[in-house]
Amino acid sequence: MTRKWTRRIWTAVAALLCGVVVIVAAGWIMVHRTPEWYQPGSLTAEQREALAERAERKLVGVQNEVARARAAENAAQHHNSARPAASAGQPFVISFTDDEINAFFEKWSVWQNVRQSYSKFLTDPRIVLREGRLILAGRLSDVDAIASLHFEPRIMPDGRLDLRLVRVLAGKLPLPAGVLDKYRDRSSRALMQRMPRWRQNASIDSTGIANANAISAAMGQVLIDVLHNRPADALLFLPVIEHGSVPVRLIDVRIQDNSITLTADPMNAAERARLLQSIRTGSPLAAGGG
């Protein structure tokens, strides 16, 4: 009787171990599988250059909108308005595909300062756009797997940006959000170490052009807020070719058909001054941009 029960116990243990091995093996395979939408090397250099140029042509339209906004602002100042205009111009709409965004950033290295914060443990970062979702993906250096964060962005009634994290994947394996704690803390610490220098050296000139430190500080704070699941300033810096980048307030975000459509509102001089003060002090902008 004892031998029979011993055999049964060891048979059950062996079956359990086999089950664990199968589960672990399946999990390992899922973790190290590359999602079909993550293809950073799928385009040729010529294709990436063409996409970057297409994005640049769209940004020419942004430059025209910025010029109109500046003209309206200068006209208001010229006529000695008793009160500054509520906005520097009319809201405008701009749309990009995910391939255009990635090609443009690769060409111009817009986020070079921010990239330095995570490049030691994350490589080949990529933005992917799916129906209603913005996906940030990259290869984790220490486990050699593709990690992806899936967000559903929206503008809240108070005007702030909610980048709600709805899914976390390692390869194709869904993970609990808590597994990000290590990477979230490392990213946050790396950004915060650079924040004092960025904030101290931040500037926005009289034409509305922000320097690299202002962009890094503002967008770095947005990233920190997103990592900690906090609403962030609905803020974006749009590059003006060969001149720099100008801040705008986001008032609508829509994602569909592998593209993102943004409705942006230019800032006037008073709003830019409040933004610069916010960047230097690390305080959030008031609802609606100040």
Image (cartoon, grey):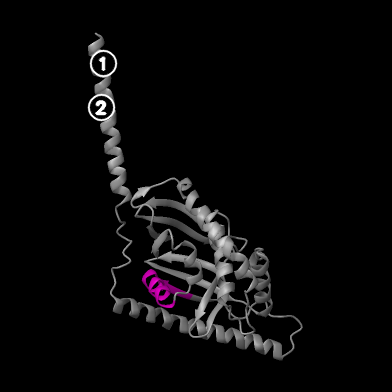
Q: Is residue 132 visible?
A: no
The amino acid pointed to by label 2 is Ala
Dot 2: few (<14), some (14–19), or many (≥20) neighbours within 10 Å?
A: few
- Which quarter of the picture shows residue 265? bottom right
Q: Earlier in the sequence, mark 1 or mark 2?
A: 1
Q: Which element is circle 1 on?
A: helix
Q: Which element is circle 2 on?
A: helix
Residue holding disc 1: 6
Q: Is residue 255 magenta?
A: no
Residue holding disc 2: 14
- Which quarter of the picture shows residue 275? bottom right
Question: In the drawing, does residue 157 fall left or right of residue 81?
Answer: left
Marks 1/2: CA–CA distance: 12 Å
Q: Is residue 98 magenta?
A: yes
Magenta-tinted stretch = 94-108
Residue at image x 41%, y 72%?
101
231 to 9, vertically: above or below: below
- Which quarter of the picture shows residue 145? bottom left
Image location (x, y in percent) of residue 33: 29, 53
Prevailing SS of the magenta stretch: helix
103 to 19, vertically: above or below: below
Question: In the drawing, does residue 104 fall left or right of residue 19?
Answer: right
Q: Residue furthest bottom?
A: 78
Image location (x, y in percent) of residue 98: 39, 69
**Is residue 179 or residue 121 the one in the foreground?**
121
Question: In the drawing, does residue 236 fall left or right of residue 285?
Answer: left
